[in-house]
Image (cartoon, grey):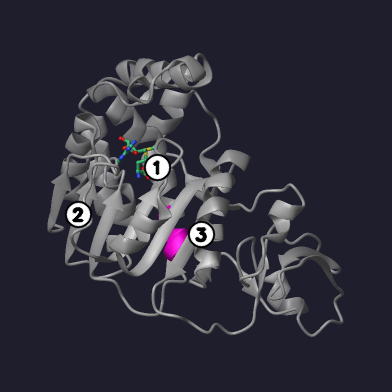
């Protein structure tokens, strides 16, 4: 996945404000804080601390989280959202991704970090929007938004399903890193939704208890993202792409009846005999084996991790 040309141009202009060496040092500083004494640092100390760290975040993380938001929102076909609330918006990543898919007429971006807000302001350009410089905890529910999105945010702040749902008019989209911890946040929110019989658009093909959780596994997906030259320089990386792993939950306020489907929860393997792991419409994990003679062989050959299939 690549960023649209005009957005790539704006991102390059933003990142050219500082020399590569300064961005490398800033990226390293963030990494040391996260990997080193993370447990001993306060939430404030873990946040982006200056302009260089914010720009380094944009250079190295923006394309991946943008790509993930597009992938996670692609099944949101019920009703096109027009108003949007982006919680922990950072440099407006999810807002820009969703605005590229839908005719968003106004976005509200909740972001307490000045440095990330400044970057986001440079990337947003024409989309009508307002920034709210508050935390999620401080934000008061006084209006609803067609779509509420929180992307890579609740691993830094406590989630609150009741508040998220009160803010939502049509869709709620939560995205977290595709790690056991990221999935545990998604799982907890899904359990809240299940208790209230809320319609799940994705990734779940059912509303049963999560069968992967029961197996001590975590539900996650992957999207391949092109790395820019600057990204490779900052990370000292050779590969011109990265596979971003993510977990997500997409809920619909309007009750929906979906056609029965199974979800591919890994890359299908093989060519003649295809083996594909599924989370089925009945809420079971199954390894489907599809020989060349199987009527669904062609469908599975063309499908990828995360797709809906019918076995
Ligand atoms: C990893 S960044 C993700 C940014 C953006 N959503 C994205 O997908 O690129 C996490 C963001 O959450 C924000 N954040 C952290 N704690 C928050 C809180 N309590 N309320 C609102 N935002 C918060 C941070 O300032 C940061 O912008």
* Left or right: 161 as drawn, with respect to 133: right
Provide residue 129's location: percent of width, then percent of height: 14, 55
Tell me the SS state at disc 2: strand
Q: Which one is earlier in the sequence, the residue at label 2 or at label 3?
A: 2
Residue 264 lies in quadrant? bottom right
What SS does tag 3 mark? helix
* Dot placed on the residue nearer the N-terminal end, 1 or 2: 2
Q: Position of residue 134 (x, y in %)?
A: 21, 40
Q: Quadrant of the C terminus?
A: bottom right
User: Label 2 to label 3, Cα distance in Å?
Assistant: 25 Å
Reply above or below: 144 against 78: above
Mark 1, ligand 1, within 8 Å: the answer is: yes
Mark 2 or 3, which is nearer the eye? Answer: 3
Q: Main secondary structure of the magenta part?
A: helix
Seen in the picture, residue 1 relative to 184 is either above or below; the reply is: below
Query: Residue at position x 25%, y 45% from top?
Result: 9
Indicate the quadrant where residue 295 lies.
bottom right
Residue at 45% from the left image edge and 67% from the top image edge: 251
Disc sitting over residue 153 in the figure: 1
86 and 194: which is toward the camera: 194
- Whole-percent x and y of residue 220? 61, 52
Residue 275: % across, % down: 82, 64
Looking at the rendered structure, which numbered label has been put on residue 108? 2
Image point 48% across, 19% down: which residue? 38
The answer to whether the beta carbon of the residue marked 3 is less than 8 Å from any atom of ligand 1 is: no
> Disc 3 to disc 1, how far (Cα)?
18 Å
Residue appearing at x 44%, y 54% in the figure: 174
User: Taking the image as drawn, is residue 100 in sight?
Assistant: no
Q: Nearer the viewer, mark 3 or mark 1?
A: 3
Q: Marks 3 and 1: CB-CB under 8 Å? A: no
Question: Which disc number belongs to residue 192?
Answer: 3
Identify the magenta region.
69-73
């Amino acid at each position: 996945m690549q960023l649209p040309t005009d957005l790539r141009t704006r991102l390059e202009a933003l990142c050219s404000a500082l020399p590569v060496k300064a961005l490398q040092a800033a990226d390293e500083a963030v990494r040391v804080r996260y990997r080193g004494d993370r447990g001993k640092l306060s939430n404030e100390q873990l946040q982006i601390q200056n302009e260089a760290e914010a720009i380094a975040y944009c250079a190295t993380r923006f394309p991946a989280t943008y790509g993930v938001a597009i992938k996670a929102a692609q099944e949101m076909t019920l009703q096109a959202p027009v108003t949007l609330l982006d919680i922990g918006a950072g440099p407006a990543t999810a807002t820009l991704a969703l605005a590229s898919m839908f005719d968003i007429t106004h976005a509200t971006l909740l972001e307490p970090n000045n440095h990330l807000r400044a970057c986001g302001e440079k990337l947003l350009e024409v989309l009508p929007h307002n920034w709210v410089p508050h935390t999620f905890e401080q934000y008061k529910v006084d209006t609803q938004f067609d779509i509420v999105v929180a992307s890579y945010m609740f691993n830094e702040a406590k989630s609150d399903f009741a508040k998220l749902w009160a803010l939502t008019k049509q869709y709620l989209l939560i995205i977290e890193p595709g790690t056991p911890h990221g999935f545990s946040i998604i799982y907890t929110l899904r359990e809240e939704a299940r208790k209230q019989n809320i319609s799940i658009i994705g990734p779940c093909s059912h509303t049963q208890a999560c069968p992967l959780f029961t197996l001590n596994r975590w539900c996650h997906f992957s999207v391949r993202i092109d790395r820019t030259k600057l990204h490779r320089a900052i990370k000292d990386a050779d590969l011109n792409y990265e596979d971003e792993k993510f977990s997500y939950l997409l809920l619909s306020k309007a009750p929906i009846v979906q056609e029965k489907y199974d979800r591919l929860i890994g890359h299908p393997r093989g060519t003649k005999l295809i083996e594909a792991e599924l989370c089925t419409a009945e809420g079971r994990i199954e390894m489907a084996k599809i020989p060349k003679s199987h009527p669904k062989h062609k469908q599975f050959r063309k499908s990828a991790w995360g797709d809906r299939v019918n076995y």
